[in-house]
Amino acid sequence: MSAIPDLQRCASTRSGTPSVKFRGVEIHSGDILLSRGGSPASALISRGNDFPGNFSHIALVHIDENTDEISIIESQIETGVVIRSAEAYINDKKLRIMVLRLRVDLPQMVRDPLLPHKAAKHLFRIVKKTHIPYDYSMNYQDPTSMFCSEVAAHAYRQFGITLWSGLSSISGVGARSWLSSLGVQYFQTQKPTDLEYDPMLDIVAEWRSAPTLYMDHIDNAIIDVLLEGANSGEEIGQRCLFFHDKYAVIRGLRASPACLQGVLTSKESLSHRIN
């Protein structure tokens, strides 16, 4: 895992579900992987709501009880809901990955300790048989198509577990305009970043490092400035152009003088936010 080499252990939450040791962590079937991607779209997903966060993607772990094979169930924009290997999941650029696990003291878990595995297995079998397209509208109540959060929410809902105790609201004019251009129609929905604080879950571990967290910090600063501009009426095409240009400047790539001037004359200094 070249981008996020350091493992931070957070809790020792026991589980009776099938498990496999992976990259220093005992991963269990039914675990939820909360991650932050390294693309501009990931920064928008993380920050583009009324309470900006730091995570942009959700995936669900399934482990075969007979072969110990790890499968990652996730919904991707390009393909819809897919099943991938753990290595394929890790190889996608991610700035950090958090492992979340259902709390063992929940009444549902006391009655059935295998519930997380059953939830993962249920969805695993569905995805094996049926193609579920990506849900661009972000309608978390319609399982015929799914964005990433719906993967975990739907799997657990079938077994009496309601994740996302609260929904994210997206009320900013800029965020709504930008997300609408990508097909989003529902602006009160289940955002990945909310799951970090879900009372039904324990944080088991996190892969992260100082350099990747710094990049996360830079991305947040950039998208926050751009969303403020969008909220004040800047055109979406102009924002997208400056978005890529600012990445070029901040990340040390070659940039045109006009691009540099655009960054330096931004209404709020990026360097102030980053440092």
Image: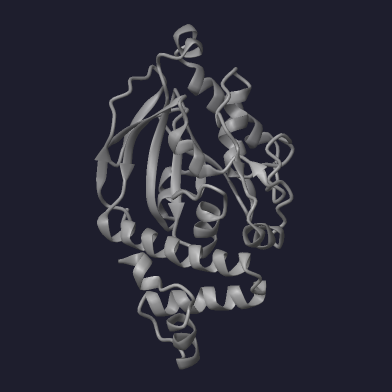
User: Relative to 14, does residue 226 appear above or below in the rendering?
Assistant: below
Residue at 55% of width from left, 43% of height from top?
A: 74
Nearer to us in this view, 135 or 28: 135
Measured as percent of width and height from the top left, residue 266 is found at 48, 78
Measured as percent of width and height from the top left, residue 22 is found at 32, 38
The image quadrant of residue 251 is: bottom left
User: Relative to 263, does residue 99 appear above or below in the rendering?
Assistant: above
Quadrant (top left, top right, bottom left, bottom right) of the C terminus = bottom left
The image quadrant of residue 180 is: bottom right
Q: Is residue 243 visible?
A: yes
Residue at 41% of width from left, 80% of height from top?
A: 249
Q: Given the current orientation, which residue lies at the most extreme top position?
A: 111
Measured as percent of width and height from the top left, residue 169 is found at 62, 44
**230 lies left or right of 195:** right
The image quadrant of residue 83 is: top right
Image color mode: one colour
Residue at 44% of width from left, 39% of height from top?
A: 33
User: Relative to 193, does residue 248 appear above or below in the rendering?
Assistant: below
Q: How many numbered circles does the render carry?
A: 0
Q: Is residue 123 visible?
A: no
Q: Given the current orientation, which residue lies at the most extreme bottom position?
A: 257
Measured as percent of width and height from the top left, residue 252 is found at 35, 79
Residue at 62% of width from left, 64% of height from top?
A: 231
Nearer to us in this view, 145 or 89: 145
